[in-house]
Amino acid sequence: MCVECGTPPKLGGAFCHHCKAPTPKEAVVCVKCGVGLTNNPPAESKDWLTALLLCFFLGYLGVHRFYSGSTGIGVAQLLTLGGCGVWTLIDFILILAGSYKDGQGNKLIRR
């Protein structure tokens, strides 16, 4: 059943692991939220605690961004020392609040 509207999925359908919208089983991207769909999202999702610790200790080098798959932003943070600490602080707060997303747009998993 859809957790948002309560309708049953179509025959052979599945749900988006991000927004829980019903999606066709062969879909690659969710048509509602645009997140990439995988067969096993929890195994590919990044760990919340690991990202938090990397951000706290090595955030000025952008290591948490490299870990989460956002290499472009990681390089920018590496070159600017985490935006002089401001960018690192914002990322740290986002991770603590549970709003931080990895490079594929998936939220971090608390294991």
Image: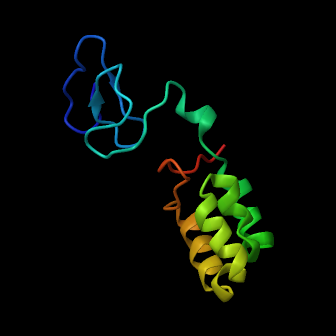
The image shows residue 54, relative to residue 18, as above or below, that is: below
60 sits left or right of 109 in the view: right
Instruction: Please state the horizontal and vertical placement of residue 8, each as a whole percent of the image.
Output: 22, 21
Q: Quadrant of the N terminus?
A: top left
Q: Quadrant of the C terminus?
A: top right
For the point 76% across and 73% down, which residue is it? 61
Instruction: Please state the horizontal and vertical placement of residue 22, each as a whole percent of the image.
Output: 27, 29
Instruction: Please state the horizontal and vertical placement of residue 47, each as a whole percent of the image.
Output: 67, 48
Instruction: Please state the horizontal and vertical placement of residue 67, each as a whole percent of the image.
Output: 70, 54
Q: Residue furthest right?
A: 57
Image colouring: rainbow
For the point 39% across and 43% down, which residue is it? 35
The image shows residue 57, relative to residue 7, as above or below, that is: below
Q: How many marks?
A: 0
Q: Residue furthest bottom?
A: 84
The image quarter in which residue 78 lies: bottom right
The image shows residue 55, relative to residue 26, as above or below, that is: below
For the point 25% across and 11% down, which residue is it? 11
7 sits left or right of 83 in the view: left
For the point 25% across and 39% down, which residue is it? 4
Q: Nearer the viewer, residue 80 or 41?
A: 80
Q: Nearer the viewer, residue 104 or 57?
A: 104
1 sits left or right of 48 in the view: left
Q: Residue furthest top?
A: 11
The image quarter in which residue 80 lies: bottom right
The image shows residue 16, relative to residue 54, as above or below, that is: above
